[in-house]
Amino acid sequence: MSGDRPTASILAVGSELLGTSRTDTNSLFLTAGLESLGIQVVRKACSGDGWDDLAAEVRIALERAPLLIVTGGLGPTDDDRTKEVVAQVFGYRLVRDEEILARLKERFARRGFPMPKVNEKQADVIEGATVLKNPRGSAPGYLVDDGARVAVLLPGVPVEMRGMWTDGAAALVKGRFPSAGGIHRRTLKVAGMAESVVEEKVQPVYAAFSGDPVTILAAAGEILLQFTALGSDGETAAKLDRIEAAFRTVLGDDIFGRDDDTLEAVVGGLFRRAGKTLAVAESCTGGTLAGRITDAPGSSDFFLGGAVTYANEAKVALAGVDPATLERAGAVSEETAREMAEGIRKRFGASVGFAVTGIAGPSGGTLEKPVGLVHVALADEDGTVVHRRLQLPGDRAMVRRWTTSVALSMLRVHLLGGGREERERSR
């Protein structure tokens, strides 16, 4: 996709990023920012704080692309070496900036205590570099340019990094790397369908737009269709609209949203527009369905409440399941799911009741009822009852996530008017 377009590398610095306690999220923001400028990211990496490792990563990144964005390692401690390493790679000296030093001392004074001596190193700037102010923190950033290569050094703290990029770094980068237009992406979202099923349906779209980057990504219970266009805002919008229209032609209402839309927010909007209310009874999902529903703002408009009915006694007492049903069919069964859905609906006086019962694992499965077996059911006040039997892959967390995505997808289809048709297919 790069062609004659400018390219960039992103390097996140910090030994903690190589462990299990921290994740680099800054690169996602920066990728979006660079793409809006028409600059394609061709490399991302994380580096520890060691001098040799960091220097090697900086050199490799600058060989791969003429623009390097570095986050982190600009603090006052001994292991903050980004500025020093980049200066060495470019062959520049560090010089003390008395104005920056004075601002640092003033910043600490406003907080009521003197500046520690270790912070003085933050006033040492790369000779000839453009210094980027940081009103949100103590570490200034830098743009280093030797005519052939550009490195932009930003703080690792996300709020500081984003502010510095937005306040000035983006404009400086744009001035050095002019482009014919931005790289714009759009994402369409599908829920409750297997990746292979979606892939088969969208093959005609791939063929029609073979020259455009289209990617299908699978998550637990959701499929993302991502596509890209290059050029000016007007050109790319029209092209993305054409690709989206083609996807919607083959997928129709299977697409629940795009870009930042979430399944729970879409379902919430449908409940509000329909003037209906919802209650849920959960077993194997342990309250995560209710959690997703209430993650969306405004859920109190339609969501009345729920019950986590792990034990059989709870299914009877809270969701109105007949003990005889549990004895005959078991807790993980179509019969129990249906009674849970109707029982929780009546208990809360809701328009719609939804129930989940299954075996999330890793133990508890049998040959007849293996791990990943889940029964979900929906009961509407108009007498509609929808049931689905699921056999889901993955570990406990994935089974739960898949189940909640299928549940929300069923609610969405029902509210769109497909409840009765789905009921017939589920039998």
Image (tube, helix red, strand yellow):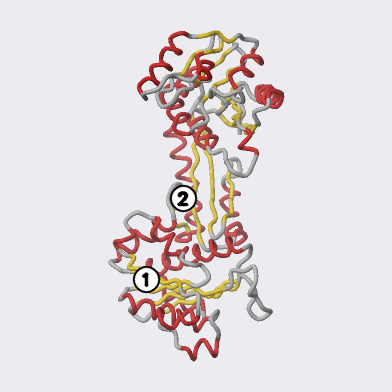
The answer to which image quadrant residue 64 occupies is top right
Residue ID at (54%, 16%): 121
- Report helix, strand or loop for mark 2: helix
Q: Position of residue 387 (x, y in %)?
A: 48, 77
Task: Check disc 1 and give the amino acid type.
Answer: Ala
**Is 39 drawn above or below residue 421 in the view shown?**
above
Residue ID at (45%, 13%): 100
Task: Check disc 2 and give the amino acid type.
Answer: Ala
Q: Nearer the viewer, residue 137 or 177?
A: 137
Q: Nearer the viewer, residue 188 or 368?
A: 368
The answer to which image quadrant residue 344 occupies is bottom left
Q: Nearer the viewer, residue 72 or 263?
A: 72
Circle 2 residue? 245
Can you tell which mark lies on residue 279?
Answer: 1
Residue that lies at the very extreme toward the front in this rendered image? 113
Q: Residues within 10 Å of mark 2 (few under 14, many from 20)?
A: some
Of the 4 image quadrants, the one containing the N terminus is top right
